[in-house]
Protein backbone atom coordinates (compact mmCIF):
# COMPACT_ATOMS: atom_id res chain seq x y z
CA UNK A 1 0.00 0.00 0.00
CA UNK A 2 1.12 3.57 -0.73
CA UNK A 3 0.71 6.08 2.09
CA UNK A 4 -0.88 9.51 1.30
CA UNK A 5 2.38 11.45 1.44
CA UNK A 6 4.19 9.07 -0.89
CA UNK A 7 1.16 9.09 -3.19
CA UNK A 8 1.38 12.87 -3.50
CA UNK A 9 5.11 12.66 -4.16
CA UNK A 10 4.62 10.03 -6.87
CA UNK A 11 1.80 12.02 -8.45
CA UNK A 12 4.00 15.10 -8.76
CA UNK A 13 6.81 12.91 -10.07
CA UNK A 14 4.52 11.65 -12.85
CA UNK A 15 3.61 15.22 -13.78
CA UNK A 16 7.30 16.07 -13.91
CA UNK A 17 7.96 13.05 -16.12
CA UNK A 18 5.28 13.86 -18.71
CA UNK A 19 6.42 17.48 -18.76
CA UNK A 20 9.94 16.27 -19.54
CA UNK A 21 8.48 14.05 -22.25
CA UNK A 22 6.75 17.07 -23.80
CA UNK A 23 9.82 19.28 -23.42
CA UNK A 24 12.00 16.72 -25.22
CA UNK A 25 9.45 16.51 -28.04
CA UNK A 26 9.23 20.30 -28.38
CA UNK A 27 12.99 20.82 -28.33
CA UNK A 28 13.50 18.17 -31.00
CA UNK A 29 10.64 19.35 -33.22
CA UNK A 30 11.24 20.71 -36.71
CA UNK A 31 8.06 22.80 -36.98
CA UNK A 32 6.56 25.96 -35.50
CA UNK A 33 3.24 24.13 -35.12
CA UNK A 34 4.85 22.16 -32.29
CA UNK A 35 7.66 24.46 -31.07
CA UNK A 36 5.73 27.72 -31.03
CA UNK A 37 2.01 26.93 -31.13
CA UNK A 38 2.19 23.93 -28.77
CA UNK A 39 -0.17 21.84 -30.91
CA UNK A 40 0.75 18.56 -29.24
CA UNK A 41 -0.05 16.28 -26.36
CA UNK A 42 2.00 14.00 -24.14
CA UNK A 43 0.83 11.49 -21.56
CA UNK A 44 1.63 8.45 -19.45
CA UNK A 45 -0.63 5.40 -19.21
CA UNK A 46 -0.81 2.23 -17.14
CA UNK A 47 -0.50 -1.20 -18.74
CA UNK A 48 -4.26 -1.34 -19.41
CA UNK A 49 -4.10 1.95 -21.34
CA UNK A 50 -5.69 4.22 -18.72
CA UNK A 51 -4.24 7.73 -18.90
CA UNK A 52 -2.70 8.63 -15.55
CA UNK A 53 -1.27 12.07 -16.24
CA UNK A 54 -0.81 14.54 -19.07
CA UNK A 55 1.75 17.26 -19.74
CA UNK A 56 0.73 20.85 -19.07
CA UNK A 57 1.01 21.70 -22.76
CA UNK A 58 -1.39 20.50 -25.41
CA UNK A 59 -4.96 20.77 -26.64
CA UNK A 60 -8.04 18.77 -25.56
CA UNK A 61 -8.35 17.59 -29.16
CA UNK A 62 -4.99 15.88 -28.82
CA UNK A 63 -4.91 14.91 -25.15
CA UNK A 64 -8.38 13.47 -24.69
CA UNK A 65 -8.51 11.75 -28.09
CA UNK A 66 -5.08 10.25 -27.40
CA UNK A 67 -6.41 8.89 -24.09
CA UNK A 68 -9.29 7.13 -25.83
CA UNK A 69 -7.01 5.90 -28.62
CA UNK A 70 -4.57 4.16 -26.27
CA UNK A 71 -7.24 2.60 -24.05
CA UNK A 72 -9.81 1.62 -26.68
CA UNK A 73 -7.64 0.73 -29.66
CA UNK A 74 -3.90 0.39 -29.00
CA UNK A 75 -4.20 -1.91 -25.98
CA UNK A 76 -6.91 -4.03 -27.58
CA UNK A 77 -5.07 -4.53 -30.87
CA UNK A 78 -1.57 -4.74 -29.38
CA UNK A 79 -1.69 -5.93 -25.74
CA UNK A 80 1.45 -4.78 -24.03
CA UNK A 81 2.77 -8.29 -23.37
CA UNK A 82 2.54 -9.04 -27.12
CA UNK A 83 5.16 -6.35 -27.78
CA UNK A 84 8.83 -6.15 -26.90
CA UNK A 85 11.22 -3.49 -25.71
CA UNK A 86 12.02 -1.05 -28.51
CA UNK A 87 8.61 -1.31 -30.21
CA UNK A 88 6.64 1.85 -31.01
CA UNK A 89 3.26 2.15 -32.71
CA UNK A 90 1.76 4.87 -34.92
CA UNK A 91 -1.62 5.78 -36.41
CA UNK A 92 -3.50 8.73 -37.82
CA UNK A 93 -6.83 6.91 -38.21
CA UNK A 94 -9.35 9.74 -37.60
CA UNK A 95 -11.94 7.49 -35.93
CA UNK A 96 -9.42 5.86 -33.60
CA UNK A 97 -7.25 8.85 -32.83
CA UNK A 98 -7.42 12.63 -33.19
CA UNK A 99 -10.09 13.10 -35.80
CA UNK A 100 -8.15 13.94 -38.97
CA UNK A 101 -5.18 12.62 -40.92
CA UNK A 102 -2.85 15.49 -40.05
CA UNK A 103 -2.48 14.35 -36.43
CA UNK A 104 -0.05 11.50 -35.79
CA UNK A 105 -0.45 9.53 -32.57
CA UNK A 106 2.70 7.66 -31.54
CA UNK A 107 2.62 5.17 -28.65
CA UNK A 108 5.56 3.44 -26.95
CA UNK A 109 5.29 0.62 -24.38
CA UNK A 110 7.51 0.74 -21.29
CA UNK A 111 9.20 -2.44 -20.05
CA UNK A 112 10.65 -2.85 -16.59
CA UNK A 113 12.47 -6.00 -15.52
CA UNK A 114 11.20 -7.76 -18.61
CA UNK A 115 7.53 -6.91 -18.17
CA UNK A 116 5.35 -4.26 -19.79
CA UNK A 117 4.23 -1.77 -17.14
CA UNK A 118 2.83 1.19 -19.05
CA UNK A 119 2.83 3.41 -22.12
CA UNK A 120 3.90 6.86 -23.24
CA UNK A 121 2.03 8.51 -26.08
CA UNK A 122 2.00 11.79 -27.92
CA UNK A 123 -0.06 13.37 -30.67
CA UNK A 124 1.28 16.13 -32.93
CA UNK A 125 0.02 17.97 -35.97
CA UNK A 126 2.06 17.12 -39.07
CA UNK A 127 2.90 19.97 -41.46
CA UNK A 128 1.63 17.92 -44.38
CA UNK A 129 0.12 14.50 -44.96
CA UNK A 130 -0.41 14.69 -48.73
CA UNK A 131 -3.78 14.91 -50.45
CA UNK A 132 -5.42 18.27 -51.01
CA UNK A 133 -3.53 19.80 -48.06
CA UNK A 134 -5.35 20.61 -44.86
CA UNK A 135 -8.69 22.30 -45.46
CA UNK A 136 -12.44 21.91 -45.60
CA UNK A 137 -12.97 21.43 -49.32
CA UNK A 138 -12.46 17.64 -49.69
CA UNK A 139 -15.56 15.57 -50.41
CA UNK A 140 -14.30 12.28 -48.99
CA UNK A 141 -11.53 11.12 -46.70
CA UNK A 142 -9.46 9.63 -49.53
CA UNK A 143 -8.76 13.13 -50.89
CA UNK A 144 -7.31 14.32 -47.60
CA UNK A 145 -4.02 12.45 -47.55
CA UNK A 146 -2.15 9.37 -46.40
CA UNK A 147 -3.95 7.01 -43.99
CA UNK A 148 -1.77 5.09 -41.54
CA UNK A 149 -3.55 2.23 -39.77
CA UNK A 150 -2.32 1.32 -36.29
CA UNK A 151 1.02 -0.37 -36.96
CA UNK A 152 4.63 -0.55 -35.82
CA UNK A 153 6.82 2.48 -36.40
CA UNK A 154 9.78 0.77 -34.69
CA UNK A 155 10.31 -2.94 -34.02
CA UNK A 156 12.81 -3.78 -31.27
CA UNK A 157 14.38 -0.38 -31.83
CA UNK A 158 14.65 -0.76 -35.63
CA UNK A 159 12.68 1.76 -37.75
CA UNK A 160 10.01 0.50 -40.13
CA UNK A 161 11.85 1.72 -43.22
CA UNK A 162 9.00 0.72 -45.52
CA UNK A 163 6.57 2.95 -43.66
CA UNK A 164 9.05 5.83 -43.50
CA UNK A 165 9.58 5.51 -47.28
CA UNK A 166 5.82 5.59 -47.89
CA UNK A 167 5.43 8.70 -45.75
CA UNK A 168 8.32 10.48 -47.49
CA UNK A 169 6.85 9.71 -50.90
CA UNK A 170 3.38 11.00 -50.02
CA UNK A 171 4.09 14.35 -48.38
CA UNK A 172 5.24 17.63 -49.88
CA UNK A 173 7.80 18.46 -47.18
CA UNK A 174 9.23 15.13 -45.93
CA UNK A 175 11.98 16.73 -43.84
CA UNK A 176 9.76 18.44 -41.24
CA UNK A 177 7.24 15.59 -41.24
CA UNK A 178 9.80 12.83 -40.66
CA UNK A 179 11.69 15.06 -38.23
CA UNK A 180 8.64 15.56 -36.04
CA UNK A 181 7.89 11.82 -36.06
CA UNK A 182 11.36 11.21 -34.65
CA UNK A 183 10.79 14.01 -32.12
CA UNK A 184 7.63 12.31 -30.89
CA UNK A 185 9.42 8.99 -30.61
CA UNK A 186 12.30 10.64 -28.72
CA UNK A 187 9.87 12.27 -26.29
CA UNK A 188 8.29 8.91 -25.54
CA UNK A 189 11.71 7.38 -24.88
CA UNK A 190 12.62 10.19 -22.50
CA UNK A 191 9.40 9.60 -20.60
CA UNK A 192 10.04 5.87 -20.44
CA UNK A 193 13.56 6.34 -19.09
CA UNK A 194 12.36 8.76 -16.40
CA UNK A 195 9.53 6.43 -15.39
CA UNK A 196 11.95 3.53 -14.92
CA UNK A 197 14.12 5.78 -12.75
CA UNK A 198 11.07 6.46 -10.58
CA UNK A 199 10.22 2.76 -10.38
CA UNK A 200 13.73 1.93 -9.18
CA UNK A 201 13.92 4.81 -6.73
CA UNK A 202 10.66 3.90 -5.01
CA UNK A 203 11.06 0.12 -5.47
CA UNK A 204 7.80 -0.27 -7.37
CA UNK A 205 7.22 -3.55 -9.22
CA UNK A 206 4.53 -2.12 -11.51
CA UNK A 207 2.12 0.82 -11.81
CA UNK A 208 -1.09 -1.01 -10.95
CA UNK A 209 -1.43 0.06 -7.29
CA UNK A 210 -0.39 3.65 -8.00
CA UNK A 211 -2.70 3.84 -11.01
CA UNK A 212 -5.68 2.49 -9.06
CA UNK A 213 -5.18 5.04 -6.27
CA UNK A 214 -4.74 7.98 -8.63
CA UNK A 215 -7.71 7.15 -10.84
CA UNK A 216 -10.02 6.36 -7.94
CA UNK A 217 -9.07 9.59 -6.21
CA UNK A 218 -9.79 11.58 -9.35
CA UNK A 219 -13.13 9.86 -9.88
CA UNK A 220 -14.20 10.45 -6.29
CA UNK A 221 -13.25 14.13 -6.46
CA UNK A 222 -15.21 14.66 -9.68
CA UNK A 223 -18.18 12.73 -8.30
CA UNK A 224 -18.19 15.09 -5.31
CA UNK A 225 -18.04 18.15 -7.59
CA UNK A 226 -20.92 16.84 -9.71
CA UNK A 227 -22.99 15.98 -6.63
CA UNK A 228 -22.80 19.65 -5.60
CA UNK A 229 -24.87 20.45 -8.72
CA UNK A 230 -28.61 19.88 -8.94
CA UNK A 231 -29.87 16.83 -10.80
CA UNK A 232 -31.80 17.66 -13.94
CA UNK A 233 -31.71 18.17 -17.68
CA UNK A 234 -30.81 21.30 -19.62
CA UNK A 235 -30.88 21.96 -23.36
CA UNK A 236 -29.02 24.34 -25.63
CA UNK A 237 -28.07 24.71 -29.26
CA UNK A 238 -25.68 26.81 -31.31
CA UNK A 239 -25.65 27.74 -34.99
CA UNK A 240 -22.38 28.02 -36.88
CA UNK A 241 -21.48 28.83 -40.47
CA UNK A 242 -21.02 25.34 -41.87
CA UNK A 243 -19.58 25.14 -45.39
CA UNK A 244 -22.37 26.45 -47.60
CA UNK A 245 -25.31 25.94 -45.24
CA UNK A 246 -25.47 26.64 -41.48
CA UNK A 247 -24.92 23.80 -39.02
CA UNK A 248 -26.83 23.39 -35.76
CA UNK A 249 -25.33 21.61 -32.75
CA UNK A 250 -28.04 20.51 -30.30
CA UNK A 251 -27.07 19.50 -26.79
CA UNK A 252 -28.87 17.99 -23.80
CA UNK A 253 -26.88 17.89 -20.56
CA UNK A 254 -28.16 15.56 -17.85
CA UNK A 255 -26.91 15.32 -14.27
CA UNK A 256 -27.94 12.46 -12.03
CA UNK A 257 -26.37 10.73 -9.03
CA UNK A 258 -22.87 12.11 -9.59
CA UNK A 259 -22.76 11.36 -13.33
CA UNK A 260 -23.02 13.66 -16.35
CA UNK A 261 -24.37 12.64 -19.74
CA UNK A 262 -24.22 14.89 -22.80
CA UNK A 263 -26.36 13.92 -25.77
CA UNK A 264 -26.15 15.62 -29.18
CA UNK A 265 -29.38 14.24 -30.65
CA UNK A 266 -30.92 16.74 -33.07
CA UNK A 267 -27.55 17.94 -34.40
CA UNK A 268 -27.24 18.48 -38.17
CA UNK A 269 -26.29 15.53 -40.37
CA UNK A 270 -22.77 15.01 -41.69
CA UNK A 271 -21.93 16.80 -44.93
CA UNK A 272 -19.80 16.11 -48.01
CA UNK A 273 -17.16 18.65 -47.01
CA UNK A 274 -14.23 18.30 -44.62
CA UNK A 275 -15.84 19.78 -41.52
CA UNK A 276 -17.25 16.53 -40.10
CA UNK A 277 -16.26 15.40 -36.61
CA UNK A 278 -15.62 11.90 -35.28
CA UNK A 279 -17.16 11.01 -31.91
CA UNK A 280 -13.74 10.72 -30.26
CA UNK A 281 -13.06 14.40 -31.00
CA UNK A 282 -16.56 15.39 -29.87
CA UNK A 283 -15.95 13.58 -26.57
CA UNK A 284 -12.64 15.42 -26.16
CA UNK A 285 -14.16 18.87 -26.52
CA UNK A 286 -17.15 17.96 -24.36
CA UNK A 287 -15.24 16.62 -21.38
CA UNK A 288 -12.79 19.53 -21.38
CA UNK A 289 -15.28 22.41 -20.81
CA UNK A 290 -17.16 20.28 -18.30
CA UNK A 291 -13.99 19.73 -16.28
CA UNK A 292 -12.91 23.36 -16.68
CA UNK A 293 -16.23 24.67 -15.37
CA UNK A 294 -17.08 22.10 -12.70
CA UNK A 295 -13.73 20.83 -11.44
CA UNK A 296 -10.80 22.92 -12.72
CA UNK A 297 -8.43 21.68 -10.01
CA UNK A 298 -9.05 17.96 -10.56
CA UNK A 299 -6.57 16.05 -12.78
CA UNK A 300 -7.62 15.26 -16.32
CA UNK A 301 -7.15 11.49 -16.45
CA UNK A 302 -9.17 8.33 -16.95
CA UNK A 303 -10.67 8.62 -13.47
CA UNK A 304 -12.54 11.72 -14.59
CA UNK A 305 -13.71 10.09 -17.83
CA UNK A 306 -15.56 7.43 -15.82
CA UNK A 307 -18.08 10.06 -14.69
CA UNK A 308 -18.87 11.60 -18.09
CA UNK A 309 -20.74 9.96 -20.97
CA UNK A 310 -21.02 11.54 -24.42
CA UNK A 311 -23.43 10.28 -27.09
CA UNK A 312 -24.41 11.44 -30.56
CA UNK A 313 -26.45 9.79 -33.32
CA UNK A 314 -24.26 8.03 -35.85
CA UNK A 315 -24.22 9.98 -39.07
CA UNK A 316 -24.64 13.41 -37.51
CA UNK A 317 -21.91 15.98 -38.03
CA UNK A 318 -20.39 15.35 -34.58
CA UNK A 319 -20.38 11.54 -35.03
CA UNK A 320 -19.72 11.06 -38.71
CA UNK A 321 -19.35 7.78 -40.54
CA UNK A 322 -16.29 6.96 -42.65
CA UNK A 323 -15.23 7.86 -45.27
CA UNK A 324 -16.55 11.32 -44.44
CA UNK A 325 -13.99 14.10 -44.98
CA UNK A 326 -12.72 15.48 -41.66
CA UNK A 327 -9.71 17.65 -42.53
CA UNK A 328 -11.04 20.81 -40.85
CA UNK A 329 -13.01 19.05 -38.13
CA UNK A 330 -12.02 21.71 -35.60
CA UNK A 331 -14.37 24.18 -37.32
CA UNK A 332 -17.28 22.20 -35.87
CA UNK A 333 -15.63 20.28 -33.04
CA UNK A 334 -14.43 23.33 -31.13
CA UNK A 335 -18.00 24.62 -30.99
CA UNK A 336 -19.46 21.74 -28.96
CA UNK A 337 -18.07 23.48 -25.88
CA UNK A 338 -20.51 26.34 -26.34
CA UNK A 339 -23.90 24.62 -25.90
CA UNK A 340 -22.33 22.63 -23.04
CA UNK A 341 -21.32 25.84 -21.27
CA UNK A 342 -24.67 27.48 -22.00
CA UNK A 343 -26.41 24.55 -20.30
CA UNK A 344 -24.14 24.99 -17.28
CA UNK A 345 -24.74 28.76 -17.27
CA UNK A 346 -28.31 28.05 -16.20
CA UNK A 347 -27.15 26.45 -12.95
CA UNK A 348 -23.62 27.79 -12.29
CA UNK A 349 -23.38 31.10 -14.18
CA UNK A 350 -20.36 32.23 -12.18
CA UNK A 351 -18.31 29.22 -13.38
CA UNK A 352 -18.67 29.55 -17.16
CA UNK A 353 -17.62 31.92 -19.92
CA UNK A 354 -19.73 33.45 -22.67
CA UNK A 355 -19.36 32.29 -26.26
CA UNK A 356 -16.05 33.10 -27.90
CA UNK A 357 -14.57 32.83 -31.37
CA UNK A 358 -14.21 29.06 -30.63
CA UNK A 359 -12.97 27.56 -33.92
CA UNK A 360 -9.32 28.31 -34.63
CA UNK A 361 -8.62 30.32 -37.76
CA UNK A 362 -6.12 28.08 -39.55
CA UNK A 363 -4.29 29.48 -42.59
CA UNK A 364 -2.75 26.82 -44.84
CA UNK A 365 -0.48 27.87 -47.71
CA UNK A 366 1.40 25.63 -50.13
CA UNK A 367 3.14 26.05 -53.45
CA UNK A 368 6.40 26.13 -55.36
CA UNK A 369 9.35 28.09 -53.99
CA UNK A 370 11.61 28.41 -57.03
CA UNK A 371 12.36 27.35 -60.59
CA UNK A 372 13.84 24.09 -59.29
CA UNK A 373 10.36 23.03 -58.21
CA UNK A 374 11.07 22.93 -54.47
CA UNK A 375 7.79 22.78 -52.57
CA UNK A 376 6.70 24.41 -49.36
CA UNK A 377 3.71 23.79 -47.12
CA UNK A 378 3.04 25.94 -44.09
CA UNK A 379 0.18 26.32 -41.65
CA UNK A 380 -0.27 28.70 -38.76
CA UNK A 381 -3.07 28.95 -36.23
CA UNK A 382 -4.66 32.11 -34.89
CA UNK A 383 -7.51 32.90 -32.54
CA UNK A 384 -10.24 35.46 -32.07
CA UNK A 385 -11.53 36.70 -28.73
CA UNK A 386 -12.63 34.57 -25.80
CA UNK A 387 -15.97 35.15 -24.16
CA UNK A 388 -16.18 37.18 -20.97
CA UNK A 389 -16.42 35.53 -17.57
CA UNK A 390 -18.84 36.46 -14.83
CA UNK A 391 -16.14 38.48 -13.09
CA UNK A 392 -13.49 39.27 -15.72
CA UNK A 393 -13.19 40.44 -19.31
CA UNK A 394 -12.58 37.86 -21.99
CA UNK A 395 -9.02 37.38 -23.22
CA UNK A 396 -8.23 38.89 -26.62
CA UNK A 397 -6.79 36.87 -29.50
CA UNK A 398 -6.66 33.78 -27.27
CA UNK A 399 -7.67 30.26 -28.24
CA UNK A 400 -10.47 28.56 -26.32
CA UNK A 401 -11.23 25.71 -26.12
CA UNK A 402 -8.14 24.74 -28.11
CA UNK A 403 -5.47 26.33 -25.93
CA UNK A 404 -2.85 26.70 -28.66
CA UNK A 405 -0.45 29.65 -28.67
CA UNK A 406 -0.34 32.20 -31.46
CA UNK A 407 2.90 32.09 -33.46
CA UNK A 408 4.73 35.45 -33.56
CA UNK A 409 4.85 37.20 -36.93
CA UNK A 410 8.65 37.19 -36.84
CA UNK A 411 8.71 33.39 -36.53
CA UNK A 412 6.22 32.93 -39.38
CA UNK A 413 8.28 35.18 -41.65
CA UNK A 414 11.52 33.37 -40.76
CA UNK A 415 10.34 29.88 -41.72
CA UNK A 416 7.87 30.50 -44.58
CA UNK A 417 7.70 32.74 -47.67
CA UNK A 418 5.23 35.07 -45.95
CA UNK A 419 5.24 38.74 -45.00
CA UNK A 420 2.87 39.78 -42.22
CA UNK A 421 2.10 43.40 -43.09
CA UNK A 422 -0.38 43.93 -40.26
CA UNK A 423 -1.38 42.30 -37.00
CA UNK A 424 -3.52 44.23 -34.55
CA UNK A 425 -6.50 43.90 -32.23
CA UNK A 426 -9.85 44.91 -33.73
CA UNK A 427 -11.49 47.81 -31.92
CA UNK A 428 -15.13 47.21 -30.78
CA UNK A 429 -14.96 43.51 -31.69
CA UNK A 430 -15.45 42.31 -28.10
CA UNK A 431 -19.10 42.05 -27.08
CA UNK A 432 -20.15 44.83 -24.70
CA UNK A 433 -20.98 43.88 -21.14
CA UNK A 434 -20.30 44.54 -17.49
CA UNK A 435 -17.41 42.29 -18.42
CA UNK A 436 -16.36 42.78 -22.04
CA UNK A 437 -15.69 40.02 -24.52
CA UNK A 438 -12.16 39.50 -25.78
CA UNK A 439 -11.17 41.27 -28.99
CA UNK A 440 -10.48 39.59 -32.29
CA UNK A 441 -7.36 40.37 -34.29
CA UNK A 442 -6.78 41.63 -37.83
CA UNK A 443 -3.97 40.35 -40.05
CA UNK A 444 -2.79 41.18 -43.53
CA UNK A 445 -0.29 38.87 -45.20
CA UNK A 446 1.38 38.32 -48.54
CA UNK A 447 3.50 35.52 -49.99
CA UNK A 448 6.93 36.18 -51.48
CA UNK A 449 7.44 33.31 -53.93
CA UNK A 450 6.45 35.39 -56.94
CA UNK A 451 4.20 32.49 -57.93
CA UNK A 452 0.55 31.58 -57.32
CA UNK A 453 0.16 29.98 -53.88
CA UNK A 454 -2.72 27.75 -52.85
CA UNK A 455 -4.56 29.13 -49.82
CA UNK A 456 -6.86 26.79 -47.90
CA UNK A 457 -9.23 28.83 -45.73
CA UNK A 458 -10.40 27.40 -42.40
CA UNK A 459 -12.41 30.16 -40.78
CA UNK A 460 -15.77 30.45 -39.00
CA UNK A 461 -18.06 32.92 -37.22
CA UNK A 462 -18.54 34.99 -40.36
CA UNK A 463 -22.33 34.58 -40.13
CA UNK A 464 -23.19 33.80 -36.51
CA UNK A 465 -21.54 35.87 -33.76
CA UNK A 466 -20.35 34.72 -30.36
CA UNK A 467 -23.29 35.15 -28.02
CA UNK A 468 -23.17 37.24 -24.88
CA UNK A 469 -24.50 35.82 -21.61
CA UNK A 470 -27.01 37.21 -19.13
CA UNK A 471 -27.47 40.57 -20.85
CA UNK A 472 -24.01 40.80 -22.43
CA UNK A 473 -23.83 41.68 -26.13
CA UNK A 474 -22.60 39.49 -28.96
CA UNK A 475 -19.06 39.68 -30.29
CA UNK A 476 -18.25 40.98 -33.79
CA UNK A 477 -18.27 38.68 -36.82
CA UNK A 478 -15.16 37.60 -38.68
CA UNK A 479 -14.36 38.58 -42.26
CA UNK A 480 -12.07 37.24 -45.01
CA UNK A 481 -11.08 39.21 -48.10
CA UNK A 482 -8.30 40.09 -50.52
CA UNK A 483 -6.59 43.42 -51.03
CA UNK A 484 -8.42 43.52 -54.37
CA UNK A 485 -11.70 43.85 -52.47
CA UNK A 486 -12.86 40.31 -53.25
CA UNK A 487 -14.67 38.63 -50.35
CA UNK A 488 -13.53 35.03 -49.91
CA UNK A 489 -15.45 31.92 -48.96
CA UNK A 490 -14.21 31.23 -45.42
CA UNK A 491 -13.70 27.48 -46.00
CA UNK A 492 -12.74 27.13 -49.65
CA UNK A 493 -9.44 26.95 -51.55
CA UNK A 494 -8.11 29.41 -54.12
CA UNK A 495 -4.84 30.62 -55.59
CA UNK A 496 -3.31 33.75 -54.10
CA UNK A 497 -1.60 35.62 -56.93
CA UNK A 498 1.69 37.52 -56.61
CA UNK A 499 1.11 40.97 -55.11
CA UNK A 500 -2.25 40.10 -53.57
CA UNK A 501 -2.71 40.27 -49.81
CA UNK A 502 -4.97 38.17 -47.59
CA UNK A 503 -6.98 40.25 -45.11
CA UNK A 504 -8.26 38.38 -42.08
CA UNK A 505 -10.48 39.90 -39.39
CA UNK A 506 -11.10 37.41 -36.61
CA UNK A 507 -14.30 37.43 -34.53
CA UNK A 508 -14.63 38.74 -30.98
CA UNK A 509 -16.06 37.10 -27.86
CA UNK A 510 -19.41 37.74 -26.19
CA UNK A 511 -19.90 39.96 -23.17
CA UNK A 512 -21.26 39.00 -19.73
CA UNK A 513 -24.06 40.94 -17.93
CA UNK A 514 -25.56 44.23 -19.23
CA UNK A 515 -23.05 46.79 -20.59
CA UNK A 516 -24.39 49.69 -18.53
CA UNK A 517 -23.31 47.86 -15.39
CA UNK A 518 -19.65 48.28 -16.41
CA UNK A 519 -17.80 50.83 -14.32
CA UNK A 520 -17.46 54.09 -16.28
CA UNK A 521 -13.74 54.40 -15.52
CA UNK A 522 -13.19 50.93 -17.02
CA UNK A 523 -14.94 52.05 -20.20
CA UNK A 524 -12.68 55.11 -20.32
CA UNK A 525 -9.64 52.87 -19.91
CA UNK A 526 -10.91 50.69 -22.80
CA UNK A 527 -11.13 53.79 -24.99
CA UNK A 528 -7.62 54.92 -24.04
CA UNK A 529 -6.25 51.42 -24.75
CA UNK A 530 -7.96 51.31 -28.14
CA UNK A 531 -10.29 48.44 -27.27
CA UNK A 532 -13.53 50.46 -27.48
CA UNK A 533 -14.32 53.49 -29.65
CA UNK A 534 -15.72 56.71 -28.23
CA UNK A 535 -18.94 56.13 -30.20
CA UNK A 536 -19.32 52.59 -28.81
CA UNK A 537 -18.62 53.83 -25.31
CA UNK A 538 -21.71 56.02 -25.51
CA UNK A 539 -23.91 53.75 -27.61
CA UNK A 540 -23.23 50.46 -25.83
CA UNK A 541 -22.15 51.51 -22.34
CA UNK A 542 -23.86 54.87 -21.94
CA UNK A 543 -20.54 56.54 -21.09
CA UNK A 544 -19.94 59.93 -22.74
CA UNK A 545 -16.25 60.70 -23.28
CA UNK A 546 -14.94 64.04 -24.49
CA UNK A 547 -12.70 63.28 -27.51
CA UNK A 548 -10.44 66.30 -26.95
CA UNK A 549 -9.54 65.56 -23.34
CA UNK A 550 -10.47 61.86 -23.02
CA UNK A 551 -12.44 62.67 -19.88
CA UNK A 552 -15.85 61.38 -18.85
CA UNK A 553 -18.79 63.79 -19.15
CA UNK A 554 -20.39 62.64 -15.91
CA UNK A 555 -23.62 64.61 -16.28
CA UNK A 556 -24.49 63.13 -19.67
CA UNK A 557 -23.21 59.73 -18.62
CA UNK A 558 -25.50 59.66 -15.58
CA UNK A 559 -28.43 60.76 -17.74
CA UNK A 560 -27.72 57.97 -20.24
CA UNK A 561 -27.34 55.29 -17.61
CA UNK A 562 -30.42 56.31 -15.65
CA UNK A 563 -32.70 56.65 -18.67
Image: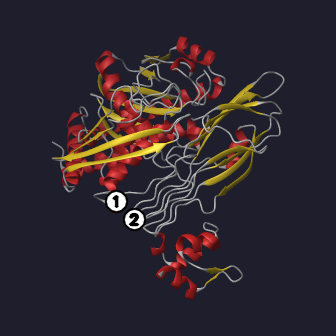
Seen at 30% across and 20% down, the residue is 76
Sort mark 2 into few (<14), some (14-19) or many (20+) by Cα contacts within 10 Å.
Answer: many
In the picture, the quarter occupied by the N terminus is: top left
**The one of 296 and 343 positioned closer to us in this rendering:** 343
Coloration mode = secondary structure
**The one of 162 and 439 positioned closer to us in this rendering:** 439
**The one of 104 and 253 positioned closer to us in this rendering:** 253
Seen at 52% across and 61% down, the residue is 431
- Tell me the residue that label 1 is attached to: 351
Q: From what the image shows, is residue 367 above or below residue 332?
A: above
Residue 312 coordinates in the image, percent (x, y): 33, 33
Residue 176 coordinates in the image, percent (x, y): 63, 29
Sort mark 1 into few (<14), some (14-19) or many (20+) by Cα contacts within 10 Å.
Answer: some
Please identify the residue farthest to the front as the structure is shown.
563
**The one of 550 and 44 positioned closer to us in this rendering:** 550
| Marks 1 and 2 in Cβ contact (< 8 Å) | yes
The reply, left or right, for residue 207 in relation to residue 59 is left
Q: From what the image shows, is residue 469 above or below residue 99?
A: below
Cα–Cα gap, marks 1 and 2: 7 Å
Check disc 1 and report its element: helix, strand or loop: helix
Residue 85 coordinates in the image, percent (x, y): 38, 20
Please identify the residue farthest to the top as the structure is shown.
162
Residue 503 coordinates in the image, percent (x, y): 71, 46
The reply, left or right, for residue 346 in relation to residue 483 is left
The reply, left or right, for residue 135 in relation to residue 22 is right
**Which circle's residue, 1 or 2, is located before the other in the chain?**
1
Res. 295 visible in picture = no
- Tell me the residue that label 2 is attached to: 390
Amino acid sequence: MIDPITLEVLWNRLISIVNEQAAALIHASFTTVVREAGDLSAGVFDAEGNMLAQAVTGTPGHINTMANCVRNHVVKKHPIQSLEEGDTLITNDPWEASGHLFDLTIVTPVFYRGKGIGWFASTCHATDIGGLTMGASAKELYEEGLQIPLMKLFSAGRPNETLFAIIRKNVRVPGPVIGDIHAQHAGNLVGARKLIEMMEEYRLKNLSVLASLLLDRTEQALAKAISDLPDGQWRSEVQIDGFDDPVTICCQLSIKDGFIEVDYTGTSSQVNRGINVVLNYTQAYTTYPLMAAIAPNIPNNHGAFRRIRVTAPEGCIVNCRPPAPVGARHLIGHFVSQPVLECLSKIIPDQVIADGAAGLWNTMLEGTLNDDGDLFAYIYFSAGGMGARSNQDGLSATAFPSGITGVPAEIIESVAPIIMHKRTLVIDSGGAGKFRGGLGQAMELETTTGRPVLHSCMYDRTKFPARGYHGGKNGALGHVSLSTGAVLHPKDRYYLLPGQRIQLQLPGGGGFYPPKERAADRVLDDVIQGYVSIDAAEKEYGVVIQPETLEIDWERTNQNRNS
